[in-house]
Amino acid sequence: MGANTTVNYYGTPYSPLTKEYISDKLRGGRGIAFPTGRLKTKSGFCAANTGVTKVKDALHQLLKTERGERLMLPKFGCNLKKFLFQPLDAITFQQIKEEVLFSCYNYLQGATVQKIRVLKGSNVGNFGTASIFILLVLKLTEDGTIFSEEITVQ
């Protein structure tokens, strides 16, 4: 009775696209590349991205969105534009750091903030106000890659 080694497979094996999706999901998933729009090199409306590019796109979305701007996620975003009309001193820079760290901790997936630095930008913004320059050093959770990203708020 132990000589029977028949194995039955039910269904169809995974397609290569499904295997790629599963492996991407295990590595942290894919994101939508921004800006959206039909690409000339690939078919479809939205391109997908992974890794550092995905986190950078998500970070820009998070920090350039004001709280209350998204319909289904009213706490998503960072209220950075309110700091443009305040004196850019050490207290304001500390409040900006806390705002960015709070938003990244709650909404940024796939990376952790290692360092943050806030500086007064050299350019003048749209309404004659000074711009804010934020430099972030992040670490990917999937493979430990460390990268930096600069964001200017005007």
Image (cartoon, rainbow, N blue to C red):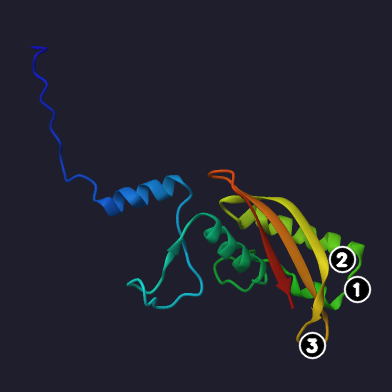
Q: Residue furthest top?
A: 1
According to the image, label 2 marks what residue? 92
Q: Where is residue 105 in the image (x, y as percent from the top left)?
A: 66, 52
Disc 1, disc 2: CB below 8 Å? yes
Q: Distance between the residues labelled 1 and 3?
A: 15 Å
N-term mark: 1 or 3: 1
Q: Distance between the residues labelled 1 and 2?
A: 7 Å
Look at the numbered disc 2 and give the secondary structure of its residue: helix
According to the image, label 3 marks what residue? 127
Task: Say few, some or many: other residues with alpha carbon within 10 Å of mark 2 (under 14 / 14 to 19 / 20 or more).
Answer: some
Please tell me whether residue 7 is drawn above or below residue 112 in the rendered image.
Answer: above
According to the image, label 1 marks what residue? 87
Look at the numbered disc 3 and give the secondary structure of its residue: loop
The quarter holding residue 10 reads top left
N-term mark: 1 or 2: 1
Disc 3, disc 2: CB below 8 Å? no
Please tell me whether residue 85 is drawn above or below residue 150 in the rendered image.
Answer: below
The residue lying at 60 percent from left, 68 percent from top is 61
Q: Where is residue 85 in the image (x, y as percent from the top left)?
A: 84, 78
The residue lying at 85 percent from left, 59 percent from top is 94
N-term mark: 3 or 2: 2
